[in-house]
Amino acid sequence: MRPRGKRFAITVAILLACSNANVIAENLNVVTPQPISEFWLNAGFLSYHVQTDKGLNNNNLGIGGEYRYSTTSALTAGEFYNSDRRTSHYAGWYWQPLAVGSLRIGGVAGGFDGYPKMHNGGWFLAAIPVVSYEYQRIGMNIAFVPTYKNMLYGAVSLQLKVKLF
């Protein structure tokens, strides 16, 4: 995208966010933590990378699980074929203390491996903003992965999931 087009896209995104800020603020709720017991299974991620010129893998298939033990928290672990076309593993903790309607808002903090430019493919820690939606036995997590230097590439990643119990 040309610099002018990029600035225009950013300006439009900011204007849309500001125009909806009052609606979001009016409907934003703090979730009261309540114990629950749910296990979700996922098949990795579908990603849209910000750096479209890098030839990155957007089809990050894999297998993972998420154990939601409260209305605000869950543990997660799994593996996927990452943006650099290598196998990655992850383990983390979701904390989503806010909600707008059925959307849970928060983040996931945890460890990842498999990215050759980060600790030579070894484990590293990351915190990633996440919005989740769940309806009966299906759900999705949308992660906003930030770019980190020339080591990790920014993306919006969609993770579809199915509740087993």
Image (spheres, rainbow, N blue to C red):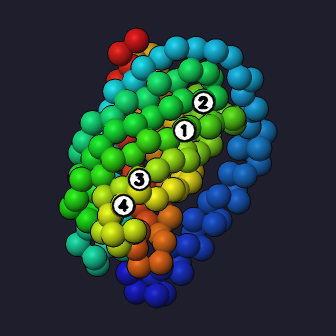
Give the class, few, some or many, for how many residues have Cα within 10 Å of label 2's Cα (few <14, many ≥20). Answer: many
Is residue 64 rendered to the left or right of residue 69?
left
Residue 111 shown left or right of residue 120 in the figure: right
- Looking at the rendered structure, the kind of residue marked 2 is Ser
Q: Position of residue 56 (x, y in %)?
A: 26, 67
Upstream in the sequence, badge 3 or badge 2? 2
Q: Under tag 1, what secondary structure?
A: strand
Residue shown at 40% from the left, 73% from the top: 151
Of pointers 3 and 1, the one earlier in the residue sequence = 1
Kind of residue sitting beneath label 4 = Gly
Q: How packed is label 3: few (under 14 Cα within 10 Å), some, or many (20 or more)?
A: many
Residue 50 in sight: no
Q: Nearer the viewer, mark 4 or mark 1?
A: 4
Residue 16 x %, y % = 62, 60
**C-alpha separation, residue under disc 4 versus residue under disc 1:** 19 Å
- Amino acid on which the number 3 mark rests in the picture: Phe
Q: Which residue is mark 3?
A: 112
**Image: 2 above or below 84:** below
Judging by the rendered image, the residue that carries numbered circle 2 is 73
**Badge 4 or badge 1: first in the primary sequence:** 1
Q: Please, what secondary structure does the residue beneath circle 3 have?
A: strand
Q: Which label belongs to residue 93? A: 1
**Distance of label 3 from label 4 (alpha carbons):** 8 Å
Question: Which mark is on residue 122?
Answer: 4
Instruction: Give the Cα distance between marks 3 and 1.
Output: 12 Å
Q: Real-space Cα distance between discs 4 and 2?
A: 26 Å
| Tag 4 near tag 1, CB within 8 Å | no
Q: Position of residue 53 (x, y in %)?
A: 28, 78
